[in-house]
Image (cartoon, rainbow, N blue to C red):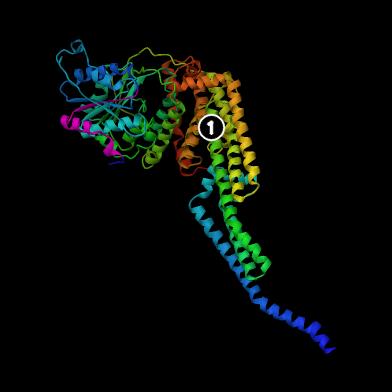
Amino acid sequence: MQDFFNNAILTPLQNLVTQIYAFLPNFFAMLLILIIGFMVGFLGKRILILFLKLVKFDRLSFRMGFNNLLSKAGIRRTPSEVIGAFVYWILFFVFLMLALNALKVQALDILIAQFFLFVPKLFAGLIILFVGHLISVFIGRAVLIAAVNAEIHFARVLARGTQVLVLVFFLAVALEQLGIGRNIVIAAFSLIFGGIVLAIALALGLGGRELGREWLEKQLGKRDKGTEEKKDMWSHL
Amino acid sequence: MTPGDSTLLSDPIQEKIKDLGEVDILVGIPSYNNSRTIPHVVRAVNAGLAKYFPNAKSVLVNSDGGSKDGTPDLVGQTNVDNLEMILVDHAVYFVNKIITPYHGIPGKGSAFRTIFKIAEALNAKACCVVDSDLRSITPEWIELLLDPIVDKGFDYVAPLYSRHKFDGTITNSIVYPMTRALYGKRIRQPIGGEFGFSGKLASHYLTKNVWETDVARYGIDIWMTTTALGDGFKVCQSYLGAKIHDAKDPGADLTAMYTQVVSSLYNLMETYTRVWPQIGNSEKVPTFGFTFEVGLEPVNVNIQRMIDSFSLGIEALGSFHEKVITPDDLKQIQDLAKKDVNQFHFPDELWVKVVYGYASAYHHNIWPREQLMKSMIPIYLGRTASFVIENMDSSAGQVEEKIENLCQEYERQKPSLLQIWNNHKL
């Protein structure tokens, strides 16, 4: 009975307690790393927000259309705060991974190793998307203003189309970076761009011959009725 | 010395300058493919110098932008054939010529920079510049631009022309009233194109590092006038008569011309922040020359097209305008965009608020500056259409009265400009 008690209950219990004792330092290490992670994340966020405010990042973001994107996404915070929060969570997540690593659980170790291999790609993808958005907004606006001043009545459609196209391009690059659906992305992108170029070529060939002629004549320095009319509008300058 | 100074003048030109030594008078002609008109301009300059400054050592400088039609050759070959016709005494007269390509950003400003550089190197006492596409220039223009410098101690002479009531709308609706309100001097044609200036002022211009900006292009005229005003040089104006020039290059991007001139005006507000906020009222500047009535070339204006452009711009560029113009004012403009020609009226007060709002938005970098300036063009076209409609039957005098009222509105609203300049809140 005594042997049974020892073998069946006491020894497993003792083993459990030993394992718990062995695990406890790792657990406390994990907690400590998490607390440090929280503090580093918090401090990093505050310092970054302060820095971004000093360099007037919010104003720049407004000019680049980032605020517009945030408000469309229902986010009421300033761009500095959003980036601060993003950096906070990234730092916290990194420390969470380190904390889990401190537990020295084999299954988790593999997961964490994979995560750290993926992180640079994720970062690169996010940065590409962010920069792509800024560039697309800038180009979209430039097209809008140029189209309005060229008296093109579908200026807004043209500008929005250009913006979407540029964004799609950067999205494709970002997905390529992440290694997601590489072949599908390349194929889809080639189809869309090829289609647009073909459409423009057809439109110009069938419906825009006059426009093409006017443009060529302007480039070659020949005057025509169109340029005379244009001059009329501006000759009072 | 500003960047690029050492490469401005080629070795042969520097040799020629060394040979010439010093000169009393320098006349600069910037050019680019002006073979049709430049012989007339050169003849008028030669005759003007011979008739009015016969005892002065003079030089004519042609600063060319790489003409392909032989413009520089024509400058070299052209002389006044019959000086006896216009001179009583000095039938033999010789003007030195320096013909050089200019370097830097292609544009009028870069051409002027080379002229300033040569003026400084030759220690010229009095200088003037005249456009190479002029058809109405006479020898008297040279006297009128140079005499206030030579004899009366002025540093800067702005031109004063008779212009068609619908000509020069950017001058009439923005540049003249705003320069007057900001710097307190009533220079009627701040971007006229022909100017007289002292050698001292030419050297002063060269000390400014602006030659990579819009000043190198169409911004040069407003920059020269404002720099003379802002840095306290003695300014005056001379009445030259009618300005008739060759038709503009139809390929030229006139949107760029508008944005460069107005951007330069706004940029200069930043340069002279220590000057313009201190100035309350404006005053007349000494005016020389004999004013007379002249026949003017008609100016064609397509009102409906300007209104259509205005309406399209207001509808499509709302996101730009709402950060520059107050909601109430923007509402007024949006309502205006729905009206037809018969009811179309853009009030002075509203227009001045728009111009000042844009100045502040430019200063505070609300949008990328080039985009900001281009977003103003449809509103400018609306204002111009309104001006043309209202003055269709007005005489030149009545139009001038309207411009005077607009100037007073600019001056009246100057305190509010200061307010939004310091804090752009809508």
Question: Between A6 and A74, which is closer to the camera in this rendering?
Answer: A6
A175 versus B186 height, above or below: below
Q: Magenta residues, as a range?
A: B4-32
Looking at this rendering, what residue extends furthest in the top direction?
B85
- Left of A171 or right of it: where is B280? left
Looking at this rendering, what residue extends furthest in the front direction?
A183
- Where residue B83 sits in the image (x, y, percent)? 19, 13
- Where residue A226 sits in the image (x, y, percent)? 51, 18
A151 versus B319 height, above or below: above
Location of residue A35 by image quarter: bottom right
Location of residue B168 by image quarter: top left
Tell me the subunit letter for badge 1: A
- Where residue B133 sits in the image (x, y, percent)? 34, 20
Whether residue B74 is visible: yes
Residue A153 lies in the magenta-colored region: no
Quadrant where the image shows the N terminus of chain B: top left
In the rendered image, which residue does mark 1 sit on? Answer: A145
- Left of A225 or right of it: where is B209? left
A135 versus B113 height, above or below: below
Q: Secondary structure at mark 1?
A: helix
Q: Residue at x 58, y 62 (%)?
A: A41
Question: Between A139 and A195, which is closer to the camera in this rendering?
Answer: A195
Whether residue B387 is visible: no
Disc 1 marks which amino acid? Ile
Residue B26 lies in the magenta-colored region: yes
Question: Between A136 and B286, which is closer to the camera in this rendering?
Answer: A136
